[in-house]
Image: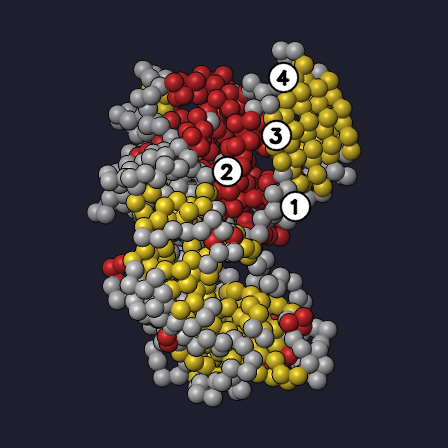
Amino acid sequence: MGQGCATIDPSILNSKWNAQWITYPGVSLTDYGVFHFRRTFNLEVQPDEFIIHVSGDNRYRLYINGTEVCKGPARGDLANWRFETIDIAKYLKTGENLLAAVVWNFGEFKPLAQVSNKTAFIVQGNGTTEMRINSGKGWKVYKNEAYIPPLVPSSHTVVGLGNEVDGSRYPYGWELAGYNDSAWKIPRMLGNGIPNGKFTFWDWNLVPRNIPFMEYRLKRIKEVERTENTQVGTHFLEGKSPLTIPAHREVKILFDQTFLTTAYPEILVSGGKGSSIEISYAEALVDENGIKGNRNQTKGKTMLSYYSDKFMPDGEKNRRFQPLWFRTYRYLELSVVTKNEPLIIEDLYGYFTAYPFEEKASFSSSDPELQNIWEVGWRTARLCAGETYFDCPYYEQLQYVGDTRIQALISLYVAADDKLMRNAIDQFRNSLLPIGLTQSRFPCSEPQVIPTFSLIWIEMIHDYWMHRDDPEFVKKQLNGVRNVLYWYGQQIDETGMLGPMDWWNFVDWSFGSWNNQKPLGGTPPGAIDGNSSIITLQYVHALQMAAELFEAFGNQHQAMEYAQLSESLWRSSYERCWSNEKGLIADTPDKSSFSQHANVLAILTGMLEPQESAKIFDRIITDEDLVQTTLYFKFYLIQAMKEAGLADDYLSLLDSWKEMINMGLTTFAETPEPTRSDCHAWSASPNYHFLSIVCGIEPASPGFKTVRIEPHLGPLNDLECKILHPGGEIIVKLKRSGDEGITAEIILPEGLPGKFVWESQETDLSSGSNKIKL
């Protein structure tokens, strides 16, 4: 598929497009529907360049002469609606050419992450030559009645429902030249495309796509787990041995990919007129009590499927079905019912899809278990990233701030890719509400507010500032930072802490499950009634990050105000919530509840002296009566461990991750067992911590202009790691020498100075190879 790297003519961004948004005439533009658009045109010679700009609502797939060249638009909101730019020259030929697209609007059944105005499609040529194919006059459109709208709204899922397709009504060959489209309709015109800021109103405010196209590659299914009423040949999964289902037969086949994946499943069939094929997808199987248990064990277990697709073939040869959106699965179950004709399943496979991260970092050590964690963590991070970051690929596919901060750090360290992080930071800024807070997840068609996630957005901006030399990008976020902190400032009560607060003040799932009557799930004591030390200290931490940002950008007055306010807040929290009896910070001034969370934040905010921080950290790790952090907030627990000077103990905290692998998970789960989601990127934090804490590679100044390498090997005897800094590779090779000594080779890219720290000894580092023996 195309890579979207073509150059945009400046006029495309600076004036109304000549192209029209087009749609199907005579129908509701907000209801469920799948539509096909075609435009034929002739070329006297094959061009060296033919650049077009494309968008649609909800989504589209674009074909040139029968070849799919891109999918889009990248998810956004109506004020920031993406268009793709692609050079299609290599797909064109002398003579007649065909530009075709399928566009769909799932109406009320669309994914929650899908913002929509109405069904529409647009193509704009980049220059005079390409403008001959502008959407408008000369195009044709067809409504595909093969797609059957869901009948039961209550069955709606957050990621959208499966597709049900009646093959007898499908217009096979619609994307090919020579197809008879004489019965197709002339599209309805909806108005010109409007680029960002170039008119007073818009249906879709068009902005260029700012991320690459998703990866799309063949991924064959690994194993047949079990069958009912049929047998599967040994070479079927290789695509070499078709499977025949006799007439009047009901068959089930359970396939095991052997690991969780995100893919477009595709089935190729012949014959079988009147039959039905249902494809169900699951992260895991469950026993009679609904328990997942070991993910590798299938005996006595059934599918726990959130959605399925259904295809009814028309009886012709080589009919292909692929759902319009990708599916997430380890287990895939095929349920077939044939009528009067046998059905031949020619092949079944998937096309893996995800954001095209490349694993540019590496980590290896004397402990092979850590390599397993690294591999599972990276798969988790990959499956939780598409056109936005996802909290989880199976259940929601929503970009939440709390998840995204951790995911973005993994992206920076392991893939050296900041595009999706920049996109996320901008999208959360675009989500800002008039009250001053960001939405908790965005883009999303249903607004949700988690005020604590607005604070994490500020920390995410600070992360980006430290890791990338991009001051203009950071600077444009600062007004949003002000707005968030102003809202919080209005919540301070007479105690000098945060008082009662509206919205859903989520911190961690260890504070209880979701409550449909009140926003209580994961909400600590004091969030609703007032004086939560945890949320007050989260506010303090964000103020401290903001103070550094505003000072760096020359606003000393604002920086000082934030610094003073943060100190006032943590002093009030200490005065009211410190328990001499427990030697810990309580969750509220009544001191009836204690958690790891409050004390983690006390350490991270600098409320405590260094020696006291180490004592408190030891206390919260050993005191099982405290509310414990789950996999999400363990990220902050580990950051606090480092702040307390105890990072050499980090590797002792990995039991939860080892247990998940022992339970057969191939990605890391949302929470400890029992868990809803088997793949949640906030649990992939070891991939970041292996590089930033164990290897000890961190920026020592904003923009990563200098580096500090302070490894914490714990029980390891040796390790090697590599990350890709914006200036080039940082390579670290370490080997213990005796009880306290170290032999190191550190290679830094040109222009990157730094320091190596071991047992409080500092050694200057320069570009090139640095050999150290301490």
Q: Position of residue 407 (x, y in %)?
A: 50, 43
Q: Earlier in the sequence, mark 4 or mark 1?
A: 1
Q: Earlier in the sequence, mark 3 or mark 1?
A: 3
Instruction: Please name whichever residue, 282 or 567, is drawn nearer the observer in this view of the structure.
Output: 282
The amino acid on which the numbered mark 2 sits, given as a three-letter code, is: Gly
Q: Position of residue 484 (x, y in %)?
A: 43, 48
For label 2, the residue is 377
Q: Nearer the viewer, mark 4 or mark 2?
A: 2
Q: Nearer the viewer, mark 3 or mark 4?
A: 3
Q: Earlier in the sequence, mark 1 or mark 2?
A: 2
Tell me the distance, in whole angstroms, between the alpha carbons under discs 1 and 2. 27 Å
Q: Earlier in the sequence, mark 3 or mark 2?
A: 3
Tell me the distance, in whole angstroms, between the alpha carbons under discs 3 and 2. 14 Å
For label 4, the residue is 759
For label 1, the residue is 469
Q: Nearer the viewer, mark 1 or mark 2?
A: 2
Residue shown at the point (56%, 26%) measured from the top left: 368
